[in-house]
Amino acid sequence: MSHTFINSDAIRHNFSIAMSEMYQKEVPLYGDLIDLVTEVNTDVLNKQPDIRQQLEHTGEIDRLGMERHGAIRLGTADELSMMCRLFAVMGMHPVGYYDLAPAGVPVHSTAFRALEKSSLNKSPFRVFTSLLRLDLIDDEALKQEAIAALDKRAIFTDNVVNLIKRFEEQGGLTAADAKQFVKEALETFRWHDKTPVSKALYQQLLSQHGLIADVVGFKGPHINHLTPRTLDIDAVQAGMQAKGIPPKAIIEGPPRRRCPILLRQTSFRALEEAVNFKNPNGGYQTGHHTARFGEIEQRGVALTPKGRALYDQLLSQARRQLGVTPNANNALEYYQVLESAFAAFPDDYRALHDEGLAYFYYQAVDSDTDNEPTLDSIDVENVNDPLSKQVITDLLEQGMIRLEPIVYEDFLPVSAAGIFQSNLHDDSTNDNEKDNETDEHSGKQSGGGINSNKEAFENALGAQVYDELELYQTLQAESLKACLGQLNSKVL
Ligand code: OOG
Ligand code: NI
C-alpha cells in the first residue's frame, strides 16, 4: 500500500509552515522580520539579475521565500534520540557535529535537514538541535535536581510517538496520519508560560548558566528562533535598526564579499517574557525568562576542507587581532580587521573553483562549438587531479560548461556560539572570554577530545551524524557526471 503514503518532503514542508505560523503568533516581531527580509530579497532580485540567474540555475529561487531554520535545546539522551526519529518522518537527518563547550556554551549540537538537492529545494527547513551538557554542572546537588526535573517531563505527545512508530513500521504515513503528525509534532515546540519548576530552582539553574535554566526549567523544548534567508544581510541589519527591531551587535561569520561564502548571521535580541513559576505549595509565582528571538542568515558557497581551513585560520587571526569577543563597542573595528584578514581569501568564483576552495555544480551550456572534449579522462570524484582539471578548465574556457556555487546548508560553531551568547539572559559581559581558544573544526578544547564528545553525542542520538563535506562532494561529483553525460550525448 506504499502508494498511499505521503512524501516526507511534503510533511516537512507542511510542518515548516505550521511552525512558522505558530512562531509568528508567539513572537510577532518575527513576522516583522520576515516582512523586512522579503522586501530586501525582492529588491536584490530586481536590481541584480546575475543573482537571480544564479538562483534559477541552482534551483534555489523557488525555495527562497520558504527558507528558514529553527533551533531547539534538549535535556536528555532519550529526548534527543526520539527527536531524531521524529525528524526522520519529515526526511530530516542529523548532519554535522558542533561542540560549543570550548566557546563557553554547555551544549553540543547537530542540524537535522534534508540531504538531497531535490529535497532541499522542495523544503530547505532545518533545525539546529542542541543537547545540554549536564556533566558540565559542577554543583553536584543541583545537577541531581536538574536530572530529576528532566526525568519527570515528557516532551512528546503519546499520539506523536505512536505515529513515529507507525511510520517506522509501515515505511510511511497516509495523508490523514501525516496531517495528524504535523499537528501533534508541533506541540513539542510550543511555548509554555507555566513552568514545572519553582522560581527558586529556576534561579539556581540560571546562576549556573542561562541555557540550563532554559532547558531544565520548562515543560518542553520551545522553538527558540526561526531564521529566514536573505540575499543581503547588511541591508537587513540596517533595516532592523530603522524599524525598531533591536539587532545583535555584530554579524557573525565571514565579511561581506562579492562571492559570499558559508554563512553570515545576525539576530534580534531575545524578548523578556512573563512566566509563571510553579509554587511547591500550589499556585504560581510570576517572573520572567529571556530565550526567544529572531535570526537572519545569508548563505554562500560551501567550502572544501582546504577552503574551510583557510576560513578558520583567517577568522581566528581576525579575532586574535581584535583581542576580545566582538561586541557593540568594537563592531566597526571588528569588521575592518575581518575584512583585511579575508583579503587573503579569493573573491571570485572561478578562482575559488580553480584553487579547490569551494564546491560547485557543473552545468552544461547550450553552445554550438564543434570542439570535441576528451571527457573520458575526467575523474568526477577528484576534479583536482591534474588531468581532470585540465579538461574541466578547457570546457570552462570553451564555454561548454559553467560553474554554479553549491550553497552551504550547515552551520558554524563560532557563529552559533555568538548567537547563543547574544541571546542568553546575561550576555552583556565578556568575562566568559574563551573565544580565542576556539578554532572552528579543530580538536583543541578543554576536557575530552573532539572525538570522544562526538561519540557521546552520537550515543545519545542513537545514530551517526552525516559528514556535511561528503554530502557537498557527492553533489559536485553527481553534477559533473550528469553534465558530462549531456555533453557526451551531444558530441556522439
Ligand atoms: C542555537 C544557536 C545557533 C545558529 O543558527 O547558528 C543557531 C540556539 O540558540 O539554540 O541557531
Ligand atoms: Ni539559528
Image: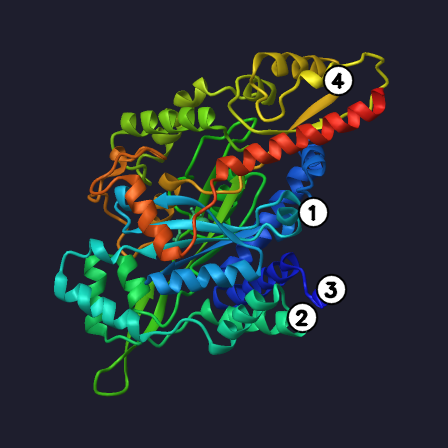
> Counting other residues with Cα less than 10 Å from the Cα at mark 4, is it few (<14), some (14-19), or many (20 or more)?
some
Mark 1 = which residue?
62
> Counting other residues with Cα less than 10 Å from the Cα at mark 1, is it few (<14), some (14-19), or many (20 or more)?
few
Front residue (pair 215, 482): 482
The residue at label 3 has a CB less than 8 Å from ligand 2: no
The residue at label 2 has a CB less than 8 Å from ligand 2: no
Left or right placement of residue 490 versus residue 316 in this view: right
Q: What element carries label 2?
A: loop
Disc 3 to disc 2, how far (Cα)?
9 Å
Could you say which disc has been placed on residue 174 in the image?
A: 2
Mark 3 = which residue?
3
> Counting other residues with Cα less than 10 Å from the Cα at mark 2, is it few (<14), some (14-19), or many (20 or more)?
some
Residue 444, relative to residue 126: is it above or below?
above
Disc 2 to disc 4, how far (Cα)?
47 Å
Q: Which residue is drawn at the image coordinates 36% and 67% (left, top)?
A: 273
Q: Which is more N-terminal, label 4 or label 2? A: 2
Left or right placement of residue 92 versus residue 309 in this view: right
The three-letter code of the residue at mark 2 reads: Thr
Q: Is mark 3 on a helix, strand or loop?
A: helix
Mark 4 = which residue?
399
The three-letter code of the residue at mark 1 reads: Asp
Disc 1 to disc 3, how far (Cα)?
27 Å
